[in-house]
Image: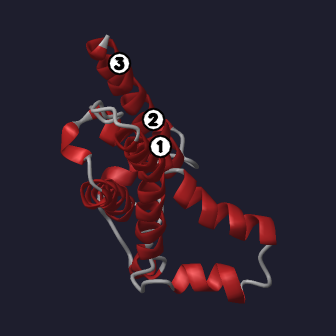
Amino acid sequence: MKIIMKVGLTITLCFYLLVLSKLILFKYLIIPDIISHFTFSYDGYFWNRHNFIPFKTITYYLFLANDINFNIRVENLTGNIIGFVPFGFILPLLSSKFHSIKEVTVATFSLSLTFELLQLIFRFGSFDIDDLILNTLGGMIGYIPIKLVNIYIHRGGQQKSVMD
């Protein structure tokens, strides 16, 4: 039964990563547009579209963006968090290497950084340090239910862990 669960979780993780890649990297692109992004020719304007200052976009959306629809601001902020919640949830169930918040946080940050760097290098979108922050927070939030269930199981006197 354990092997079936691991296979199911692995398939789920792969499908999740494909969907996440589509949503993050290719949300506005069709195949010919994707191919054209591999030219590596960048002009000065390209580098000005990115955010390398922590909390700049978050602050803008929360307090300064009166000209942008409230729903768009909320969707952008919460979307970055919600998009990475499944990663923080699936990872500790799939591997014993990810049984602590620190390990899940580092893994989520690394995945998010990979997506942001791909956007930067291949011009699939814009690099935003705030996306790294929000995505990592999402992975941490996804880990919380797993940890709480594990604590509940251990307090109940059972030796088995949900993460095993």
Name the secondary structure under disc 2.
helix
Tell me the residue that label 1 is attached to.
86
Quadrant of the frame with the N terminus: top left
Q: Nearer the viewer, residue 67 or 151?
A: 151
| Disc on res. 9 | none
Residue 135: where, in percent of width, then height? 45, 61
Chain-order first, disc 2 or disc 3: 3
Chain-order first, disc 3 or disc 1: 3
Rounded to the nearest angstrom, the CA distance separating label 2 from label 3 is: 16 Å
Circles 2 and 3, Cβ within 8 Å, touching? The answer is: no
The amino acid on which the numbered mark 2 sits, given as a three-letter code, is: Tyr
Tell me the residue that label 3 is attached to.
5
Q: Nearer the viewer, mark 2 or mark 3?
A: 3
Tell me the residue that label 2 is attached to.
16
Quadrant of the frame with the C terminus: top left
Circles 2 and 1, Cβ within 8 Å, touching? The answer is: yes
Circles 3 and 1, Cβ within 8 Å, touching? The answer is: no
Which residue is found at the position 32% from the left and 51% from the top? 38
Which residue is found at the position 72% from the left and 83% from the top? 65
